Image: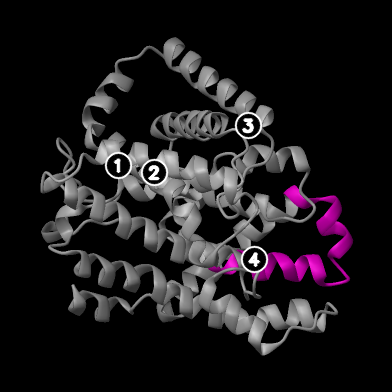
Amino acid sequence: MRLDASERFRHGEMDFSQRIGWLDGLRGFAMLCVIMGHLSGMDQQAKIWLYSFHMPLFCIISGALFRYEKYDSILACVKDQAKKLLFPYVMLTIVCAPFWYINHIVFGDGKVSFKRLLVGFLTADQYEGTMTNGALWFLPALFLTSVVFWFLVDLDHKGKVNWGGALGICAALAIGVGIFCEGKPTAWNVTGVPAMVIFYGIGCMAMQSYRRHRDAIESLSPTVMTTVIIALMSVGTWAAFANTKVSLLVNDYEVFALMLVSSLGISACLALLFMNLPNVRPLTFAGRYSLDYLGLHIPMMRFFESWRHTAELAQSHAFILGLVVFMMLIPVVYVIERFTPILVGRWPRKKRDRLQ
């Protein structure tokens, strides 16, 4: 989230020159929710709540950091986003392969052909093929979302289309996809992109007036702020359970309006909380290196769930296992970022400095 002087996206009133601490913390919390949601022993009711907002929240945060002015053409956008998202996808797929083999072949009884692995890698679809890390589907999907959104904003800047209206079209497409393609994942989650673009755009619009929003929030009394937070969480949670479990991956939105209410209500509540809470360093660290966490939590989690000495404990105490995995990844991620960032698709720091 660091914006270099030559690459700052001018969000109307906003001009970032350093990392946004509370946004790092918020993304770290979203990553913790992703880990909890992927635990096989997690309570189903808890999963309904977690799935109602955690991936939309990632899209919202990505949209909040969108910078149209960074690219002078769609080709430049494609190249940069490929470097940031597709190259890490390739590297993390390779890194996760030996751990996948241990968890599924050595500890389990799975038999997977090379063809299924290749199909899974090329399509980022763990239903048609086999992925070494199922969570990595998000990276190609976010790549498509970023490029599509930049294209819509570019058309808006050229006066060819109103991108607010374009988001409305995306909403209509998402509803159609939810009706006709429910439970049917596609390569690179193409059918899920319209819904992801909506959340991406909402994040961008929210950040355009960030300073005004922040001033308005800071003018609220503690009582009013607490009331707003409780109201947002209550409405969002009600909508989540009224709608049952949703999934951007398989286009399963149930009632689309309820999906929007739950995801936006809970996300807004969490954003207000993290704006006002003190810095929680483990969450901030996870938010800063969320790509590492996304790529590494599944192998570690599945090891504990597959290894016979911890399998029973993992099922009966899933929440504790989630916290353990989250905290154990801190030193692992630190070592990787310090010495071998190429493993998660990032250039070593000196190399990155030369590239920038």
Taking the spot 65% from the left edge, 53% from the top edge, the residue there is 183
Question: SS class of the residue under badge 2?
Answer: helix
Mark earlier in primary sequence (4, 2): 2
Indicate the amino acid at tag 3.
Answer: Ala
Assess whether mark 4 and mark 1 are in contact (beta carbons under 8 angstroms): no
> Who's the residue at 53% across and 29% down the image?
257
Q: Magenta region, mostly helix, strand or loop? A: helix
Q: Nearer the viewer, mark 3 or mark 1?
A: 1
Q: Label 4, on which residue? A: 298
Locate the N terminus by quadrant. bottom left
* Helix, strand or loop status at disc 1: helix
* Disc 1 crowd, CA 10 A, few/some/many (<14, 14-19, 20+): some
User: Which mark, residue 166?
Assistant: 1
Q: CA distance from mark 1 to mark 2?
A: 6 Å
- Going from the N terminus, do you reach mark 3 or mark 2 first? 2
> Is disc 3 placed on a helix, strand or loop?
helix
Residue segment shown in magenta: 295-319
Which mark is first along the chain, 4 or 3? Answer: 3
